[in-house]
Image (cartoon, grey):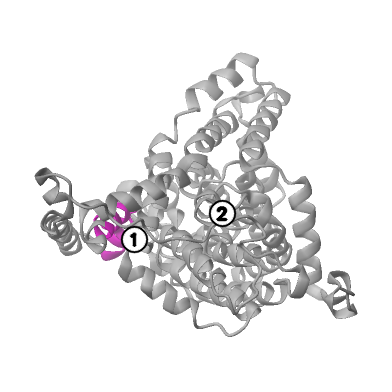
């Protein structure tokens, strides 16, 4: 068969699609598995700690003692995958996703459609966005009438996390700053309590969210490969069958409860009672954005939606292998964070504090917003944990913001804007999605890195320009 000019990928692909294809090809060849990325990061920060004068004993002690610091978070992230998968593969939600997957009428529209829904859901809850976006991408990829690139779909499904997650209501930093009981005493003395009216729901933050969503959607649309450059799920060896196996026939009387809807309904009633009780006694945002509460509700919701314990457990069994990467990789990030923050060198300063002092020392004269955004993005490459990193970064960043008369609420949002940037490069938060998609980080990073190249200057520009619209408001320190 003779290849026509329009079939040749180097001729057909233009603009963003050509750029994405080039980056995708490079990352598939050179980008290591996410676990290798984590191992290399640990070695790099250990060398950095030794370079600032930390003793080898301090480095190895920080590594070993901090290795399990994220144990609870590791379990939570594994449960994010499991609960999201179980809910999304339940018959009612699977039918909804299948209907949504029929909306796009072209391959590129499908990619941008997945990106928009992923970012929209992420504003409410980033954990749901990962799994919902991943399963929507799989449903779209199953359409025989769309010759759509599975890598581009997967990258679009990640945009809720990679583009806007920290500007939404589940932002760890904004949630912490709005909850007096959660703010460490040392930080509370610097910032006071900053409710969502000073962070998430300022017009500057909402405008930033809108701009980034539009930018992300346009890039996702025009960077999707077409024609012979497309790599479908089948080309990548991914099985798209999300249907649970039919339950086996009852073989003994003791199995009748496994096929009964009674226990799931009762468990659902208990969960609903807990949810109503908390909504009546606590601020609604603190309830809907609580990760533990989210996991409880979604686990029980999955049980109810599947109808019987047997069907629920079949779905759980299918979801468990998807958590493997999280279980072995997150401890390395915990060790990395411990070395960065606890292995001190000359003057009793850690690597993290050396970085902070460097950036804040040159952050005056209107450049503070840009410097803090750059610092947050750089540190996020090595400590990709929104809530945990804010606890490390906030005391000296917020004190510096006060010193240069920068609005504290906007400083939190500068952090949130920049916090998403490392996710486009570092596959830490990509792991749950990769498990759902059946892909590796190298399959998506070419597309997400392209987003990073566009997002970085836009985020820095917005942090600077919109920061000029704020006035400094001295913090109100509660008694």
Residue 286 magenta: yes
Kindly identify which numbered label has been placed on residue 356.
none
Residue 81 appears in the rendering: yes
Q: Quadrant of residue 226?
A: bottom right
Q: Is residue 369 left or right of residue 396?
A: right
Neighbour tally class for label 1: few under 14, some 14-19, many 20 plus, Cα within 10 Å: many
Q: Which residues are magenta?
A: 284-302
Up the image or down, 282 lies above or below 7; here it is above
Instruction: Report x, y in % for residue 355.
Output: 67, 40
Mark in the foreground, 1 or 2 = 1
Q: Nearer the viewer, residue 98 or 199?
A: 98
Kindly identify which numbered label has been placed on residue 87. Answer: 1
Dominant secondary structure (helix, strand or loop) of the stretch shown in magenta: helix
Pointer 2 residue? 401
Q: State how far apart marks 1 and 2 are (Cα).
A: 42 Å
Viewer-proximal residue among 372 and 283: 283
Q: Secondary structure at mark 1?
A: helix
Which residue is rendered at x = 25% and y = 63% of the image? Answer: 305
Q: Earlier in the sequence, mark 1 or mark 2?
A: 1
Q: Is residue 163 above or below residue 71?
A: below
């Amino acid at each position: 068969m003779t290849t026509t000019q329009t079939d040749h990928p180097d001729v057909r692909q233009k603009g963003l699609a050509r750029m994405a294809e080039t980056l995708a090809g490079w990352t598939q060849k050179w980008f290591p598995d996410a676990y290798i990325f984590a191992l290399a990061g640990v070695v790099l920060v250990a060398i950095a700690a030794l370079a600032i004068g930390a003793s080898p004993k301090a480095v190895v002690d920080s590594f070993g003692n901090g290795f399990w610091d994220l144990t609870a978070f590791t379990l939570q992230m594994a449960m994010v995958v499991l609960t999201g998968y179980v809910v999304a593969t339940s018959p009612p939600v699977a039918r909804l996703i299948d209907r949504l997957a029929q909306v796009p009428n072209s391959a590129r529209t499908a990619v941008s459609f997945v990106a928009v829904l992923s970012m929209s859901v992420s504003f409410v809850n980033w954990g749901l966005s990962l799994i919902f976006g991943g399963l929507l991408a799989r449903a779209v990829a199953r359409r025989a009438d769309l010759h759509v690139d599975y890598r581009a779909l997967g990258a679009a499904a990640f945009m809720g996390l990679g583009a806007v997650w920290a500007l939404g209501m589940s932002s760890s930093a904004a949630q912490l700053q709005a909850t007096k009981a959660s703010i460490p005493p040392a930080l509370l003395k610097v910032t006071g309590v900053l409710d969502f009216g000073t962070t998430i729901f300022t017009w500057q933050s909402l405008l930033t969210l809108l701009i980034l969503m539009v930018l992300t959607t346009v890039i996702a649309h025009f960077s999707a490969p077409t024609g012979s450059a497309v790599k479908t799920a089948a080309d990548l060896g991914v099985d798209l069958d999300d249907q649970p196996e039919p339950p086996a026939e009852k073989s003994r009387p003791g199995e009748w409860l496994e096929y009964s809807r009674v226990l799931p309904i009762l468990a659902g009633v208990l969960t609903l009672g807990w949810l109503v009780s908390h909504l009546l006694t606590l601020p609604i945002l603190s309830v809907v954005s609580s990760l533990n509460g989210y996991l409880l509700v979604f686990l029980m919701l999955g049980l109810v939606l599947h109808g019987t314990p047997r069907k629920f457990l079949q779905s759980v069994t299918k979801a468990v292998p998807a958590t493997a990467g999280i279980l072995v990789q997150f401890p390395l990030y915990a060790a990395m964070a411990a070395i960065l923050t606890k292995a001190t060198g000359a003057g009793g300063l850690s690597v993290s504090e050396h970085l902070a002092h460097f950036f804040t020392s040159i952050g005056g004269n209107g450049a503070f917003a840009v410097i803090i955004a750059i610092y947050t993005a750089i540190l996020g490459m090595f400590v990709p944990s929104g809530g945990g990193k804010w606890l490390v970064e906030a005391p000296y960043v917020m004190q510096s913001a006060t010193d240069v008369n920068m609005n504290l609420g906007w400083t939190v949002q500068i952090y949130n804007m920049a916090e998403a940037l490392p996710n486009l490069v570092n596959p830490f938060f990509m792991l749950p999605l990769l498990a759902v998609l059946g892909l590796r980080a190298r399959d998506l990073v070419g597309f997400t890195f392209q987003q990073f190249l566009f997002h970085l200057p836009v985020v820095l520009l917005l942090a600077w320009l919109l920061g000029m619209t704020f006035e400094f408001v001295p913090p109100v320190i509660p008694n």
